[in-house]
Image: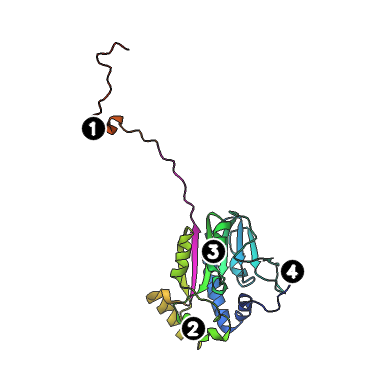
Amino acid sequence: MTVEPDQPSALARLEAWFHSPLGMEVARLECASVEHLLTNTFGYYLVQVGMAERFDTALATSRIRHRIKLTGEYTKGLTNAPIVGLASALPIASDSIDAVLLPHVLDFTDSPKAVLDEVERVLIPEGRVVIVGFNALSAWGLRRLIWRSKGRVPWCGRFRSTSRVADWLAELGFDIEICEYLMFCPPFGPLLGPRCTRLDALGKRWWPVFGGIYVIRAVKRVATLTPLKPLRGNRSALLTGRAVRPTTRGSSHV
């Protein structure tokens, strides 16, 4: 029996934040990026961890046949009821999934490396993971330092830098294929209009690593073992010192 928690987690409360004006603009940009990165991703199974409904539109265009939602807690009113399970202990068989989507999961977990360990475990060789997160090295990260004590989402999360995420992925044998940065407009003041449009254009051109949102697509690489050929060099080269090469000259034996 599933027990509904008394207090929703920060990741669950982030769903409500995405209905705010700021959240809706973030969702629009993130969905467009995810849709773009999944265009050339193929397979049979895609698992989305967390954020059960936010990326439905982006996933609807994916070429992967079966799409599975996994959330950390029961939530009322969700269409296509998701599987309930922990991101750090996925209830999925090893080497069985073609792609995993992690929208803001690393921002709201105390064990990001354990989450990525599980992603590596369930992905098939050459499987893809798409990670969406708030960039610590941005105006958004600066505001988080000021507001994190207030307990409000998303500022109560633990924003990561892309270099930190890249290091974790490299340790697990992933290669980053694409890293996109979004939302160069600061998280205060008007987000729509010419001013924000100019900031986004300038940011993408001159300081892309300072975007408030990052979207990473990485591929799981599996090293193949190459059998070593037996050493078949000239045996005489191994003879040193006063060793004498064997000969049959002068012998009566045939």
Asked whether the viewer can see residue 239, the reply is: yes
Choose top left, top right, bottom left or bottom right for residue 167. bottom left
Residue 59 screen position, x and y as percent = 60, 65
Lower sequence index among marks 3 and 4: 4
Vertical arrangement, residue 17 with respect to residue 100, above or below: below
Read off the magenta span. Answer: 212-229
220 magenta-colored: yes
Secondary element under disc 3, as helix, strand or loop, is: helix
Choose top left, top right, bottom left or bottom right for residue 42. bottom right
- Rate crowding at label 3 as few (under 14), some (14 to 19) or many (20 or more) other CA atoms within 10 Å: some
Which residue carries the number 1 mark? Answer: 241
Q: Are marks 3 and 4 in contact (CB under 8 Å)?
A: no
Task: Depth check: give the residue in front, 201 or 69.
Answer: 69
Callout 3 amino acid: Leu
Q: Nearer the viewer, mark 1 or mark 3?
A: 1
Which residue carries the number 4 mark? Answer: 2
The residue sitting at 52% across, 76% down in the picture is 158
Which residue carries the number 2 mark? Answer: 145
Disc 2/disc 3 C-alpha distance (Å): 25 Å
User: Does residue 226 appear to the left or right of 10 in the view shown?
Assistant: left
